[in-house]
């Protein structure tokens, strides 16, 4: 069995389609009650085109109870609205087939004839059954976009453009060029920067006083000839220690234009932040080199997304970067040493906005870069971005956010208080310290299903196993007599085991009984009884016991196979114990128990791909029904997009600094005891 | 007769002593009633030293009526004060010999014994007679400085430093470095810039958490190890079309450290703004070259003042530039073309603050440059700075401000309304279009006194001539039998005639009767009767009549002499007519007559050196007693200093944009008739 590699971001990048698919995957997470095994409702949209072209037809599946407006918006179908779907503007008119409840707002908006014909306000129609919906052509530009995990964002980007047609000056009207321009813009009062002023006299006169003012935040950064208001772009970066993802956004429409990802060019200096910080401490020349490497990564991705999107880099006016505290310090050229040694101190929680040129980017000469604030040295801007994308500060449910990695960040909210901490999970999830470990790249085993017996499982056996999640069902291969089914990235010969494969392998070995609760392989002589179909795979390399996951050919020696070793299991145990100790202590702080958690968000380019069932089985997350475990996707990147689409959301990210309490675990006297308690499966 | 070249700024620069002397010259201007021919009062200060060194003795002369505090402050003698001499802080205690009135504040401040001993608050003692004053040692740092024309400025520079000793971080106090620093500063909340953040982690730790925060305006620009609070410098530039003057200021003390001046390196592109603007229109490469030339001028002067002052350029944190609209546009690299062609439009009235590096200056890497705002294309930032330095918006008297040059700026205030305009005077004052014209450099004749008869003048004759001003008396040479007495810059052989010499020459020729009221030389045959001692100097070069001012040797032909030609007289007539038409129309706008003007401020590096008596005689200024005509000195440079010493004064300069009404003369239908009316003497 192999999976479509496009389902997963990795060294080869992922496409715009994947982003859209992620959006779809993420949406149900906000309404888990609505997809508790009873599936989805189907909405068939017919979207009329203002240009007279044939209407577009799109069918989407959403959890029952979602409004028609949200269902459309989450799926990139624009419905007129000036209030963003809040029931106040009365503009989101659609025609719904069949009988639909009529709201009091509908009565005030439509005639009796129209109501009989099915016209309703889309933001007030809940989709509780399959519906056919006609959407009239847009008469206004879209005002909202859906990003993150079911987050709808009213478009109010920091990048604004205003087209004006000015009177020419004369002896009776000698107003300076700038005053003439700014007095024609009634809703913004930006300060000019030197670049814009240098261009202003020439552009005004060459363009017959018909120009577009380009404003970023509170600065007038440029003036362009003619009307360029629909050309407004920005780049959102998820600046990861391992992988960096860039999304080119059309901030006027709120839509992504192109996405690209690549390995962080700092990799040669070490796989994790501590190694890179150490490198800067050894040699003062390393900091500028690391800064340069980060910069080169951002630059290459910017070139790629602009090329793919057909966008002039000079029309990219803003950048947002979500990165952990070390990545943020390094790309800004700030010495990271205090982050790496006790007491783990940041230079600042909120880096200043800098020019794109300050981090080496050649976009608009006055393009600005916004960096997400950080809660602590090990709960960085990437996590704040993730909290923004998942609405951790807005949801009344008890939710646990886990970004799994070498450093694992945990956030828990009970709808009132928000706590966060960091747990040192070690390199197991990134493939480090694992015998056949590798990154999530071509040839990596990422999904494993073991069959203990040679015969197909009985109905009883199937019933006893944990039910697979919705995603697992979608990916489930047809039954195969092979006792070890593998999902391999890139549909190639397996070469190793990535983090999600490691979790799956251990979870499956525990399930079939080849690993006991303490994490030890069972004695070799018991294996044929416990799992006859797999017994021959339990062997040794030297003195160490291993389980063979993949044999390149039937006679291959264990040394030439992809195996899981006893030590690998121990590594994973330590990692998951660190994490589960973290959320256990956070739950205790809030006076909550495991079962109180209503949603677990598995975040990050790695965490999103762990099988929920496996995560539950090994105890990485609380023991909950798998439907409460949601893959949240690349939430750091989604948060960065939100910051670019809405200054209000950006302010929300900054406000999180005050709203979230950082809990330091490393100085708790009971930490070690609790950690040991969590080691078993 | 020759004058000390140090009295006049020019190509050779002027010294700190000159600046101090200028301050002395300027002060009386604020209180003209007090020096109406009855001279000055003398104050003998004995200034005690806190270190135990012998007291310093200084004697100063001020107009009667000035307070003891102001008399001291204007002369660089610091007296304790926290209110800046406004009678509220009760700290400016001095001991005055002899009987002095006792104010009610004195009674509340001193014991009966102290009052009997002569103790008074210095800001409440008016100097109406000669006084001996004991000044105790300073117990506080100076809070105010005197600059401009009698302007006292409470020190509140944009450049601030705060020394802090911080707690070291620990696991219980992981505050970020920046928060740790800023929370220790209770009166300022600056935003960090990237430069400061990059230095912060290292400097904090290397300096044991004892550091000085450097704040400019609202930005944290640096953090320095140890206590550097008394090292705060800034540079004030008067960026003239011809001459550029730089003053290095200690903004902590409010005192100048070094002064330098040089020719603007843009000179090769033309002597006046119109020629330089035209040059940019001919060739697009000229704008960057002019920008570079301006920048090179600023850079060379910065190097010079830092070297002379023994100040590290990296401790210069701010720069203020007062320049006309064209000079400001050129140094910022903004196309000046719209300034040079009707309808004469600026790009902006208030240029943004830029980094010193943006104009090529290598000072502190985050040093900022403040540019003075401009009222119009021809009433620029230099004039706004001059208005600030002369307090045009604060004085209740009717005052006329004249900056004489190729473009002559005029400002009039009646204590309520302030009007300004520009008058195109042409190049006469700068030595252009004048047969023997030259800049005010070595060899230029700048003062002329003619004696019509060979005998010494009778007492009657002396009584009939206009009494010389205080400055003229000071400069007056001993009587000499030579009928043409010349003041020459640099004490060298005369080579030509600068602007003030031109005005003097014409004024004297009118006085002795060799020029008639229409500006024509009288017929040659009448000269021996009118002015027997000078008649042989009235001759011709070709067909043109000339007056010989200097013969290199007795037999020299007129062509080899320094002469004033009939055409030169016409040039000056046009120039003065443009100017006097300007102020005549401004006076009419305010419903005032010539005699209502209580003070005329002659400003600018040229205007300040015109003899008041000559200016009155040729009609360049209203016909007023010469004591009302005040040389205001280099007010643009003084205004730039004020902006650096006080953010409140800087805000005052920006407020002038709203307070001053610009009057456009060029489109008035009666302008030409009025101009012709003003041509005669």
Image (cartoon, coloured by chain):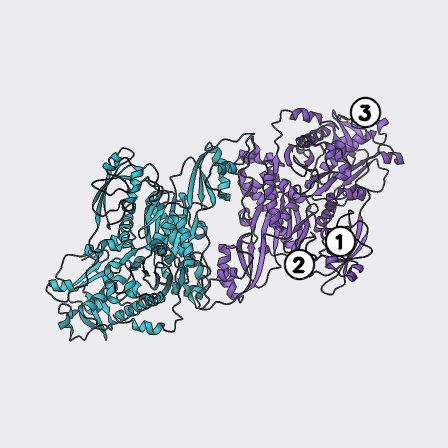
Chain colours: A cyan, B purple
- Is the Cβ of the residue at disc 1 closer than 8 Å to that at disc 2? no
Q: Kindly identify which residue carries mark 2.
A: B141
Q: Which secondary structure lies at badge 2?
A: loop
Q: Nearer the viewer, mark 1 or mark 2?
A: 1
User: Quick check: do tags 1 and 2 share a chain?
Assistant: yes
The vertical placement of B396 against B304, above or below, is above
Relative to B167, is A259 on the left or the right? left
Q: Kindly identify which residue carries mark 1.
A: B103
Count of picture labels: 3
Label 1 crowd bin: few (<14), some (14–19), many (20+), radius 10 Å: few
- Percent position (x, y) of residue B51? 71, 65
- Percent position (x, y) of residue A268? 36, 61
Letter of the chain that mark 3 sits on in the rendering: B
Q: Nearer the viewer, mark 2 or mark 3?
A: 2
Q: Quadrant of the N terminus of chain A?
A: bottom left
CA distance for labels 1 and 2 = 26 Å
Q: Is residue B602 visible?
A: yes
- Answer with the quarter of the image where residue A133 lies: top left
Q: Which secondary structure lies at badge 1?
A: loop
The vertical placement of B234 against B538, above or below, is below
Q: Which secondary structure lies at badge 3?
A: loop
Relative to A566, is B46 on the left or the right? right
Label 3 crowd bin: few (<14), some (14–19), many (20+), radius 10 Å: few
């Amino acid at each position: 069995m192999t999976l479509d590699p496009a389902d997963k971001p990795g060294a080869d990048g992922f496409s715009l389609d994947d982003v859209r698919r992620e959006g779809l995957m993420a949406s149900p997470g906000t309404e888990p009650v609505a997809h508790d095994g009873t599936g989805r409702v189907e909405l068939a949209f017919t979207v009329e085109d203002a240009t007279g072209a044939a209407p577009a037809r799109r069918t989407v599946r959403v959890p029952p109870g979602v409004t028609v407006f949200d269902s459309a918006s989450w799926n990139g179908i624009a419905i007129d609205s000036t209030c963003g779907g809040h029931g106040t503007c009365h503009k989101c008119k659609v025609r719904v087939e069949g009988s639909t409840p009529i709201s009091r707002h509908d009565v005030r908006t439509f005639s009796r004839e129209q109501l009989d014909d099915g016209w309703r306000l889309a933001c007030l129609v809940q989709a509780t059954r399959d519906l056919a919906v006609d959407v009239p052509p847009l008469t206004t530009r879209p005002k909202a976009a859906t990003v993150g995990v079911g987050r709808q964002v009213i478009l109010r980007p920091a990048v604004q453009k205003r087209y004006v047609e000015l009177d020419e000056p004369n002896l009776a009207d000698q107003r300076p060029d700038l005053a003439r321009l700014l007095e024609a813009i009634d809703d913004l009062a930006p300060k000019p920067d030197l670049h814009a002023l240098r261009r202003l006299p020439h552009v005004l006169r060459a363009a017959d006083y018909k120009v577009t003012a380009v404003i970023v935040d509170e600065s007038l950064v440029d003036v362009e000839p003619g009307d360029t208001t629909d050309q407004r772009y920005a780049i959102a970066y998820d600046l990861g220690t391992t992988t960096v993802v860039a999304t080119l956004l059309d901030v006027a429409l709120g839509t992504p234009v192109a996405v690209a990802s690549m390995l962080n060019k700092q990799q040669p200096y070490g796989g994790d932040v501590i190694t890179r910080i150490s490198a800067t401490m050894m040699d003062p020349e390393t900091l500028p080199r690391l800064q340069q490497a980060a910069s080169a990564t951002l630059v290459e991705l910017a070139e790629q997304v602009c090329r793919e999107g057909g966008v002039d880099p000079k029309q990219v006016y803003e950048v947002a970067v979500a990165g952990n505290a070390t990545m943020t310090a390094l790309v800004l050229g700030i010495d990271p040493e205090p982050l790496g040694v006790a007491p783990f101190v940041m230079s600042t929680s909120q880096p200043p906005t800098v020019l794109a040129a300050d981090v080496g980017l050649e976009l608009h000469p006055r393009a600005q870069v916004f960096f997400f604030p950080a809660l602590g040295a090990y709960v960085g801007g990437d996590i704040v971005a993730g909290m923004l994308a998942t609405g951790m500060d807005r949801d009344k449910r008890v939710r646990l956010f886990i970004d799994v990695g070498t450093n694992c960040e945990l956030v828990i909210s009970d709808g009132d208080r928000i706590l966060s901490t960091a747990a040192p999970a070690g390199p197991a999830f990134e493939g480090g310290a694992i015998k056949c470990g590798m990154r999530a790249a071509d040839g990596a085993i990422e999904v494993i299903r073991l069959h203990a017996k040679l015969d197909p499982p009985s109905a009883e056996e199937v019933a006893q196993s944990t039910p697979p999640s919705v995603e697992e069902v979608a990916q489930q291969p047809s039954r195969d007599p092979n006792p070890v089914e593998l999902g391999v990235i890139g549909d190639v010969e397996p070469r190793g085991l990535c983090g999600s494969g490691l979790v799956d392998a251990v979870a499956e070995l525990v399930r079939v009984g080849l690993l006991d609760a303490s994490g030890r392989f069972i004695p070799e002589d018991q294996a044929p009884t416990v799992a006859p179909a797999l017994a021959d795979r339990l062997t040794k390399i030297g003195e160490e016991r291993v389980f063979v996951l993949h044999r390149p050919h039937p006679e291959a020696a264990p040394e030439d196979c992809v195996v899981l070793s006893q030590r690998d299991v121990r590594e994973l145990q330590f990692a998951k114990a660190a994490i589960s100790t973290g959320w256990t202590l956070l739950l205790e702080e809030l006076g909550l128990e495991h079962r109180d958690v209503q949603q677990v968000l598995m975040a990050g380019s790695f965490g999103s791909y762990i099988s929920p069932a496996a995560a539950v089985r090994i105890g990485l997350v609380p023991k909950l029904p798998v439907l409460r475990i949601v893959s949240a996707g690349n939430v750091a990147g989604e948060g960065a997009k939100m910051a670019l689409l809405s200054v209000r959301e950006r302010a929300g990210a900054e406000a999180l600094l005050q709203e979230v309490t950082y809990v330091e675990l490393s100085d708790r006297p009971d930490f070690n005891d609790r950690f040991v308690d969590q080691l078993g499966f």
